[in-house]
Image (spheres, rainbow, N blue to C red):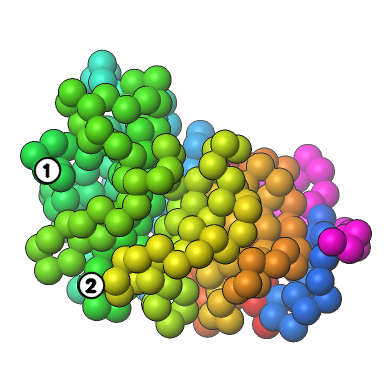
Amino acid sequence: MDMPRHVLLQTKTTNQSFAMHPSLSIYDESVKHFINTDFEIETLSNDCQFTEGPVWNSEGFYLCSDITANAVLKFVPGKKKEVFIAQSGTANEADEDLKPGQAGSNALAYDGEGSLLVCRHGSHEIARWNGKELQPFLSSYNGKPFNSPNDLIVDKKGKIFFSDPPYGLKEGKLNPEKFQPIAGAYCHYNGETKIFCDKYQYPNGVCLTPDESQLYLCSNKPFEKFISVFDAETLHFKRILAEENSDGIKCDPNGNVYLCNKDGIIILNSEGKRLALIQFPTIPANCCWGGEGKKDLFVCARENVFQIRNLLR
């Protein structure tokens, strides 16, 4: 691999300034064909606890979970954040089966009808927000509650793909007597839930390619450093995209893949080749596209929430 070229980026202060300057490391010049390399990074908030699971709403705002705060937050450009859903993971954070600080909600996604789906660690379910309260939608498999649904994505047909690691359980470990005996990845469609992967101990990010023909699944644990590719229709394993770790994972419209891990956000092409790395002051957990034309990148990074406007060309 060629030595990367480092580009110092400008920073823009929205609420608070960075403690350090971020940088872009370019490994392959082809990245310049689809991203702007002179972008600014805005800090939208620096007083959250552990942000995750962002989603863009077409009405002009972002939502994300603060797992530790047990809340879904709303970010409207130019305004202060607000609590959108309180007790988004559970109403009982003191449950002895839960890991302290991990009882909140995680990934958020909209289904084909425009309803918000919420992965709830503490309630061991995926729920649907009706505008007033969270209603259970997917709560169990083979007669037992899920562990702590982590990430999810919904395709145009209405298929729901999601991961179910034990991060929200006590000590972050499986409890097969009460919950699922494995940490699986699932597909729910037409009232039926199927498990399509049980090869990870901590399955995490899930993502569809732009044409929705393939699904990516990953883990952020060093001992399972590989990104799996599945046929989104048959759910059959196809190949390993790359030997990388990732928490959240996203694609852009060109099929490039964005990995959130301890190094920052790594950009791969559709063949798994590293193209670039965007570094942040804190570790990114997840990201999503939003704004006009969905060219802006919204980044959840621990206590911080960042935005890169017009990252995509």
State whether residue 83 is above or below residue 212.
Answer: above
Report the magenta stretch's main SS.
Answer: loop
Q: Residues within 10 Å of mark 2 (few under 14, many from 20)?
A: some
Which residue does the numbered mark 1 point to in the structure image?
Answer: 142
Does 239 sit left or right of 101 as displayed? right
- Report the amino acid beneath label 1: Asn
Residue in view at x 49 percent, y 52 percent: 218
Which residue does the numbered mark 2 point to in the structure image?
Answer: 158
What is the secondary structure assignment of the residue under circle 1? loop
Residue 123: x and y in percent read 21, 36
- Report the amino acid beneath label 2: Gly
State whether residue 303 is above or below residue 231.
Answer: above
Q: Are marks 1 and 2 in contact (CB under 8 Å)?
A: no
Boundaries of the magenta span: 1-22
Residue in view at x 49 percent, y 58 percent: 228
Residue in view at x 71 percent, y 46 percent: 263
Residue 306, visible in the rendered structure: no
Residue 182: x and y in percent read 30, 37
Q: Please tell me in which quadrant of the rendered image residue 125 appears.
A: top left
- Of marks 1 and 2, which one's residue comes earlier in the chain? 1
The alpha-carbon separation of the residues under discs 1 and 2 comes to 22 Å
State whether residue 161 is above or below residue 32.
Answer: above
Residue 137: x and y in percent read 14, 53
Residue 221: x and y in percent read 55, 38
Q: Does the magenta stretch include residue 111?
A: no
Which quadrant is home to the C terminus? bottom right
Front residue of 286/166: it is: 166
